[in-house]
Image: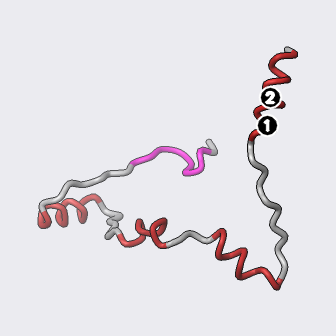
Amino acid sequence: MMIASLLITVVASLVPQQEQLDLTPKNLDAVLERILPEDPELRWKNVNWRVSLAEGIVDAKAAEKPILLWAMNGHPLGCV
């Protein structure tokens, strides 16, 4: 048990601490610039998504492209 506690302490000390960021009206733009996603992270919005499988099949056949069917059961956040 003593070794596990020591190991946890050593590992925790090696993890870099996050900079504390206080939100004020003066630094709002800088904070938003740091936390909002950049263009490469938003490329999924440019995909021509289909919500109907039938519509997707028609479009995929016309474009000779495969279909990605995403199906799930339960709450989207895993809260079941």
Q: Residue at x 17, y 64 (%)?
A: 58
Total marks in image: 2
Q: Are marks 1 and 2 in contact (CB under 8 Å)?
A: yes
Q: Looking at the rendering, which quadrant does residue 4 occupy?
A: top right
Where is mark 1, residue-wise?
Answer: 12
Q: Is residue 48 above or below residue 2?
A: below
Q: Residue at x 84, y 23 (%)?
A: 6
Q: Residue at x 12, y 66 (%)?
A: 62
- The residue closer to the viewer here, 15 or 28, is 15
Position of the N terminus, as image quadrant, is top right
Place of residue 57 in the rendered image (x, y in percent of width and height, measured from the top left):
20, 59
| Element under disc 2 | helix
Which mark, by number, is residue 56?
A: none
Q: Is residue 2 above or below residue 54?
A: above
Place of residue 60 in the rendered image (x, y in percent of width and height, measured from the top left):
18, 61
Which mark, by number, is residue 8?
A: 2
| Element under disc 1 | helix
Amino acid type, residue under disc 1 in the picture: Ala
Examine the residues drawn in magenta and state their main secondary structure. loop
> How far is disc 1 from disc 2 in space, using C-alphas?
6 Å
User: As drawn, is 49 to the left or to the right of 11?
Assistant: left
Q: Looking at the rendering, which quadrant does residue 22 occupy?
A: bottom right
- The residue closer to the viewer here, 51 or 21, is 21
Amino acid type, residue under disc 2 in the picture: Ile
Span colored in magenta: 71-78
| 30 within the magenta span | no
Place of residue 67 in the rendered image (x, y in percent of width and height, measured from the top left):
24, 54
Position of the C terminus, as image quadrant, is top right
